[in-house]
Amino acid sequence: MSESQEYKYIGQRTIRPDGFDKVTGRADFGADLSLPGMIWGKILRSPHAHARIKNIDTSKAEAHPDVMAVVTHQDFPAVSAGGFAVGEGQVDFKDLSRNVLADDKVLYHGHAIAAIAAKSEAAAEAALSLIEIDFDVLMPVLDIAEAMKPDSPLLHDDLFTQGLAEQPEKASNIASRMELKKGDVDAGFAAADVVVERDFSTPTVHQGYIEPHATTVRYDEDGQSMVWCSTQGHFDVRAIISTLLSMDLSKLKVVASEIGGGFGAKTTVYLEPVALMLSKKSGRPVKMAMTRDEVFRASGPGSATRSRVKIGATKDGTITAMQAQLNYAAGAFKGSPMGPGCMTAFTPYDVENMYVEGYDVVVNKPKAAAYRAPGAPQAEFAAEMAVNELADKLGIDPIEFRLQNAAKEGTQTIYGPQLKVVGLVECLEAAKNSPQYKQALAENQGRGLAAGFWFNIGGQSSVVINMKPDGTGTIVEGSPDIGGSRASMQMMAAETLGIDTSRLTPVVADTEHIAYSATTGGSRTTFATGMAVIEAAEDVVRQLKERAAAVWNVTVEQIDWADGVATNVASGDKLSVADICETADKTGGQVSGRANINARGAGPSFAVHLCDVEVDKETGKTGVVRYTAIQDAGKAIHPSYVEGQYQGGAVQGIGWALNEEYVYSEDGVMENAGFLDYRIPLSSDLPMIETVIVEVPNSFHPFGVRGVGETGIIPPLAAVATAVSDAIGVRMGDLPCSPPKVLKAIQDAS
Amino acid sequence: MTKTHVTTTVNGEDTEFLCEPNETLLSVLRNELQLTGTKEGCSSGDCGACSVTMNGRLVCSCLVLGVEAEGAEIGTVEGVSNKENLHIIQEKFLEHAALQCGICTPGLIVSTKALLEENPDPTEEEVRYYLAGNLCRCTGYDKIIRAVMDSAEVMRGGA
């Protein structure tokens, strides 16, 4: 927008600094590192969804000549239960230890039980069959509603519901309950002229990164062990492994490889501690990589949900009360993103009376991991569907209805703070003015619109900028770059230093070469690590001015700094960054700028998506024909990558709405654990995804940045499902709107 | 199992390797020849991350055996650019920001090159269907399609 003119580099569409390596195949991802003497590890996984392990006999495997090491849970030190914040979620070390390798129970089909390291990947795979296990098979519980029943089979004998008024005496699959409220919903509903109340459900889905989890490790009994892995946060991997293996932090170096997608799910560990234990026992470097089948069965998934939402409004379109019960499947261990779901569900609305109740429920599925705005897509799907239905019942345009009730600066959120300046109204206006909203629908087409809200986070980031004698610099950061953030770092540093982006090289350093930086998640990196980059660049500028002052024998106050050039105010003499760096040896040594921050003031990002679909009423197949994603970026540092986040989020959401789901057999075996049957959107499924970047600056960031990575996956679920509902004249409350379900809805209605 | 000796050509270079009879070409490229630009995403021919050309034909190297490379000409992402310059397709992928994480990019570049050799003037729909075997989870494909269409235009102009 207008402000982009003020900047030289920010807002440009530069070529990303890591691009060359990515298009030539030179970039090294998780599975791309091999070490001398390296052997391969493979994991034996549970054939049952729920069973007690009576005995594990590894003797035959250990005796096999190809096998170099075997590990089970018994090789790991006992760790006590305890939380640790990673990204947007909490890790419980005891649960994680039992997820990495099962202890006395397997809790989902594919749960890791033992691992073997052998001379080749094939030999390791073959030797898995030599491990003998006695199981006592138990009844699995897959459905949230079933798991919540008092007489349901229990996953954990020691799980007691947290958050109840009274401490329960009986174990339960309900790990916790949460309640948020503001105002008086009963009074709000009493004041309503129209009330909508409906049930919704969303399936278990997978983040679907194309790169399977992979790691190469080398245990060093004397010095420092090394873990190379594909992760969103190598410092947190270091912390987790050091706890799970009772190692000193100083004995562990973690190197973040290039990461082939994560979307939240590469914020925890699966293979890394197991590989390190195999390396310790075998004395050899070990590589492990999951197959796609393992990725589906034992990593990721995003939580399934069952929800009930009730919303009331007066005839003139004022929402008087919003209420929800949101039940999340955590998978095998507690810790679904129910909390953020409850907090976000109704946040796009400035409504006096709200009540949200959430339940975190364990089921015999893989432990849920964060998935892009974790918890919010499911919650806001239910809320936005109900809002659209209410707008319909009132006969009010869905954009006007939202504008009338939109959250804005000063809106009291249900979870605590009042909103600062936010851009929801601007997004809604942009939707109203979009070409798509003005385009007439053809036969069998339908239109849906939905809003989305995500908090975004800040957190700790560390950056060092090392200047070289030729006036170029290296930006050393600790935030894995998952979608092009190095380009943003380069641009923010260039803008601050006043030198061209091509003179700055961003590097994601390992845990030894930069101080702690929090996991890339919560849309924090361009915001928080960007702030650290700016601060480190300002530190460089401060020192360059001092050096220039030293050259001219004047005080720093007599130096003017602009566009990467120091000017002696008195004489008019000039020194460029390169001039100063070239003579740094004579003015006190080389120049490095530094910033270690704990960034606060993350700016929430609102989005509004508009979806037009066409439904084939013979088959129930839905195609997206037009799509517009509108979102407040605060300030788009690199507009192409901001658009890319909007488009990528939109398409993941379209997949969630239309196709994607874990299909289970009765005995708890996932039946579609491959990309052919778990069908993520293909290029042939989609139209171009139009984008509108709204820029309502975040005053807490020097350039106005809000995070942009996550919000874009929230609105599509309701936008698509509303469009399908509009096309077929039946309200779809259960995702995905897959052909069989849509066809059945059409047939049931006729 | 005894390993099989295979003589082949990879990116124009005469190449020999030993492989297990059941080893995939993908594994040979990555583990025997250290050509790790070809990526493994599924090993079932569904994601296209391992796309290479074999005698000019686009294939998933996870569905080809290493021994089938005997006497064949294999093309991988490492052979797309020359020593001096990126290929136009590679430049256009960068210019259009057609990648985020980049894991699918090598496969998409190999597939795009094969597409444009077969069909220098594809419609958007033809591009979308030709590349339907190359999964990308980050971009929503929009910028990829634009990069391919732009590459085609430039390559036609330059021919």
Image (cartoon, coloured by chain):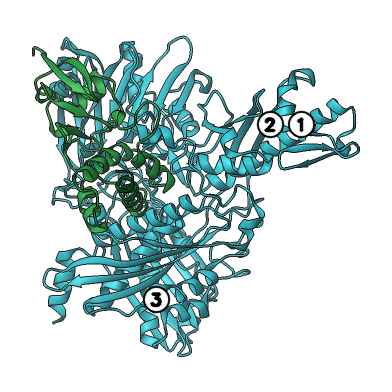
Chain colours: A cyan, B green
Q: Is residue B134 visible?
A: yes
**Which residue type carries mark 3?**
Tyr
Residue A558 vs A634, above or below: the answer is above
Q: Front-most of A574 and A367?
A: A574
Q: Identify the mark nearer the N-term, 2 or 3.
A: 3
Q: Is residue A698 visible?
A: no
> Circle 3 marks a residue in which chain?
A
What is the secondary structure assignment of the residue under circle 3?
helix
Name which residue lies at 36% across and 40% down.
Answer: B88
| The disc label shown at residue A437, or none | 3
| The disc label shown at residue A593, or none | 2
Q: Identify the mark nearer the N-term, 3 or 1.
A: 3
- Which image quarter holds the C terminus of chain B? top left
The residue carrying pointer 2 sits among few (fewer than 14), some (14 to 19) or many (20 or more) residues within 10 Å by Cα, namely many
**Which residue type carries mark 2?**
Gly
Residue A389 picture quarter: bottom left
- Which image quarter holds the N terminus of chain B? top left
Tell me: A626 left or right of A52. Answer: right
| Percent coordinates x, y for residue A104 in the rendering | 26, 32
| Percent coordinates x, y for residue A571 in the rendering | 89, 36
Q: Tell us which disc is closer to us: 2 or 3.
A: 3
Per the image, the residue denoted by label 1 is A543
**Which residue type carries mark 1?**
Gln
Name which residue lies at 54% across and 44% down.
Answer: A488
Name which residue lies at 32% across and 36% down.
Answer: A99
Name which residue lies at 12% across and 76% down.
Answer: A747
Q: Front-most of A374 and A198?
A: A374
What is the secondary structure assignment of the residue under circle 2?
strand
* Distance between the alpha carbons at the discs numbered 2 and 3: 49 Å
Q: Are marks 2 and 1 in contact (CB under 8 Å)?
A: yes
